[in-house]
Amino acid sequence: MSSVPWYRLACYLSKYLLTGKLRSFIEQLPPYEPDTDMPAETGMRMLSYLGHAYLWGDAHHVPDRLPARLSDAWCMVAEQVGRPPILSYPSYCLYNYRVIDPAQPPYIGNIEIVQNFLGGADEDWFILIHVDIEARAAQALRVIPDALLAAHTGDLPRLTNALKEVEAGLGAMNATMLRMPEYCDPYIYYTRVRPYIFGTKNNPALPNGLVYEGHFDNQPQLFRGETGAQSAIVPTIDGLLGIEHANDPLREYLMEMRTYMVPAHRRFIEAVESRSQVRAAVEANPDNVPLNEVYQACVGQLYAFRAKHLEYAATYIHKQGMQANNSTSVGTGGTPFMQYLAKHRDETKVVV
């Protein structure tokens, strides 16, 4: 089957990248025909890595178009999974790990990364931290239906207990976030990991976008790069707690990020946002100390998560760019990341 050569190339991607001939190898692949047993997300991960390796594998020359052989495959599978043909968070994190012992939770120590660019501990660890955060978030996400029902019916003890689980889940996420420096060095991240996950929107290397030969009427496309803002966790918790972002470019960006999420995750966020009466229930019962305290604790944990994210952005990106005399105010998602992350954090603190 003609998916095998593609799969083999992806498996040894770190080796082929070092040859300087990866683009020619991709151009010589046979037409892509996915294995009927291969999940669409597996194909999307593989093609997204190959696509970004084709784009960013040679920093001295960034092509402004992808060959039809690659475009045909990538656009076909992207349509199947409901996301643009670009490397996004689901392919980079959510569908990019294996559980070592299925009887144990998918936490660090029991998970391994499937696909890399250059590979190494720093690249693996950066992704593993995100996988672990997603797994820890389950404690908070699984009680959301209970919290929504409790707020709707006015069952305040039940709502309080549900929010305790949300706060504990957010606390576990924060504990994992603190582990990022253990194996992911800021310099290695900036020079060996980050370059491969950029998109084409607001990217000075591709000011006019990227042509996917044979698709989009051969007009250049502008897609955001991989970023944690494409995870559904935080916007879901925002929706649950009633944390709102001002109607400005930041909010527009956050809404745009949903097009890069798993479609079912987008629908879940929208359902929580449209149904949550949690904040209204808290505000209507100011004398209920347990409810108010746990609600404020949830907001505090979310604020801490955003604050740590901002701190890492300063250490892993801004500081490294300054030291390399290559400072950039634009993140992998194509935004002024320091400004946006600070605003994320501050709009969370307002509620406290």
Image: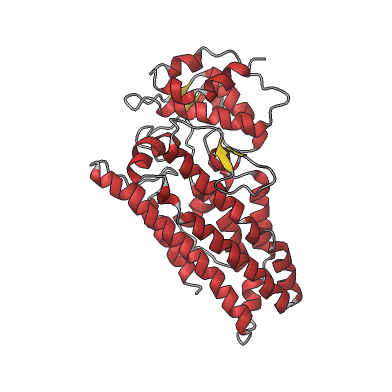
Q: Quadrant of the N terminus?
A: top right
Residue at the image point whose x is 59% and y is 55% from the top: 136
Picture coordinates of residue 288, whole percent (x, y): 63, 84
Q: Residue 48 appears at what percent x and percent y? A: 53, 31
Q: Residue at x 54, y 63 (%)?
A: 171
**Looking at the rendering, which quadrant does residue 339 occupy?**
bottom left
Estimate the x, y position of residue 165 in percent, counting from the top left.
64, 66
Q: Is residue 120 above or below residue 69?
A: below
Q: Residue furthest bottom?
A: 287
Rendered image coloring scheme: secondary structure
Using the rendered view, name the quadrant where residue 84 is placed: top right
Q: Is residue 231 visible to us here? A: no
Question: Total label count?
Answer: 0
**Is residue 259 shown left or right of residue 190?**
right
Task: Left or right? Give the position of 336 relative to 11.
Answer: left
Q: Quadrant of residue 6?
A: top right
Q: Residue at x 55, y 17 (%)?
A: 69
In the image, residue 310 sits, relative to residue 42, either above or below, namely: below
Foreground of the two, 312 or 274? 312
Q: Residue at x 47, y 36 (%)?
A: 222
- Residue 241: % across, % down: 60, 68
Horizontal side of residue 330 vs 248, given as left or right: left
Is residue 109 something one can see in this rendering? Answer: yes
Residue placed most toward the observer, 216 or 51 = 51
**Vertical placement of 177 versus 66: above or below?**
below
Q: Nearer the viewer, residue 269 or 185?
A: 185
